[in-house]
Image (spheres, rainbow, N blue to C red):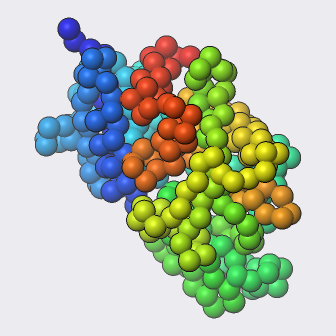
Amino acid sequence: MRGTVVGVLRGGPSKEHEVSLATGHAVITNLPEDRFTVRDIYIDKDGIWHERGRPVMPANVLPSMDAVVVGLHGEYGEDGEVQKLLERFGVPYTGSDSFGSYLAMHKVLSKERAKEMGLLTPKYRFIERADDAEAIAQDIIRSFHQPVVVKPIRWGSSVGISIVGGYQPVHSAILELLEAGAGGVLVEELIRGTEATAGVVEGLRGEELYMLPPIEIIPPNGSFFSYDVKYSGATEEIVPGRFQKYVQNDLMKAAKTMHEALGLRHYSRSDFIVSPKGIYYLETNTLPGMTKESLLPKSLAAVGVSLPDFLTHVVDLALTGKKR
């Protein structure tokens, strides 16, 4: 009997291409064969779609799919672009819709939303034009404790993030990201504390918004949770994190708050710094990774939810068009 046909999108033109391939592989191997007929859709770094090794037009493959699991990360996958395409063809898909994806991916818009919701978030400056970099870098040196965090506005997986101090290093870091096509640069005050992340899943175990246990993240040698240490296996991740009960509750509540405030769908994972001054919101991931080093599967496993069960659940959410 033909199962529900589910396309898995992986790869893509972002700097997280390799991570997306691993996420897509994990999705493909964990979608239950008795329920789903899986179609592996590879998107190359130029944005060209492929199936079974041959280039295909989205218009030729999407109408034959019952649903799509978006296994992409970064630009095109998490910024709402591929979601617009799927919406145009009327194909149900997992994860947030195009607008929610765009809002969460844009670090300034999501931070401002967090502030509106009463959450703490690091002070920041936003730079879009290289012509403004010199003046803003000078202002940052005067008004922020050094070092500071310099990050691209819309890339994920900590790609392009640096922690630098002093005018010349800050100015250079800003220019490098702008020249690399970051589309905008965020310079934040560095909040010292423990890195944490907390996920939410809609409709799981009968709850409107099921809150997963927060994870405590301990990068090696006191470094930050960079792209390299995320996927090297060198970082210690403790789930549930060794936080006091009220801190755990506040992290879960904040993750739920941001999921709702950004208008997200199906599932998300929000990142925080737990400091002596309070819990600081950093950003929200609308398509967290599914690799063996990824955080969401670890928090799901901690509450006894397998990856096949989770994937079945979110595909069912997509198929039923269930709203909160």
Left or right of 139 on screen, residue 14:
left
Residue at position x 19%, y 37% in the image: 51
Q: Nearer the viewer, residue 70 or 313?
A: 313
Query: What is the quadrant of the C terminus in the image?
Result: top right
As drawn, the residue found furthest toward the top would be: 1
Q: Residue 267 at x, y = what percent?
A: 56, 34
Q: In this view, does 62 lie above or below 245?
A: above
Q: In this view, does 295 lie above or below 233?
A: above
Q: Nearer the viewer, residue 45 or 306?
A: 306
Left or right of 305 on screen, residue 71:
left
Residue at position x 39%, y 48% in the image: 291
Q: Residue 42 at x, y = what percent?
A: 26, 43
Residue at position x 68%, y 86% in the image: 165
Q: Can residue 93 be seen in this view?
A: no
Query: What is the quadrant of the N terminus in the image?
Result: top left
Q: Can residue 4 be seen in this view?
A: yes
Q: In this view, does 305 lie above or below 140?
A: above
Q: Residue 30 at x, y = what percent?
A: 33, 33
Res. 187 image quadrant: bottom right
Res. 308 image quadrant: top left
Residue at position x 50%, y 20% in the image: 317
Q: Residue 239 at x, y = what percent?
A: 59, 48
Q: How many marks?
A: 0
Q: Which of 178 and 29 is in front in this view?
A: 29
Res. 192 image quadrant: bottom right
Left or right of 257 on screen, residue 304:
left
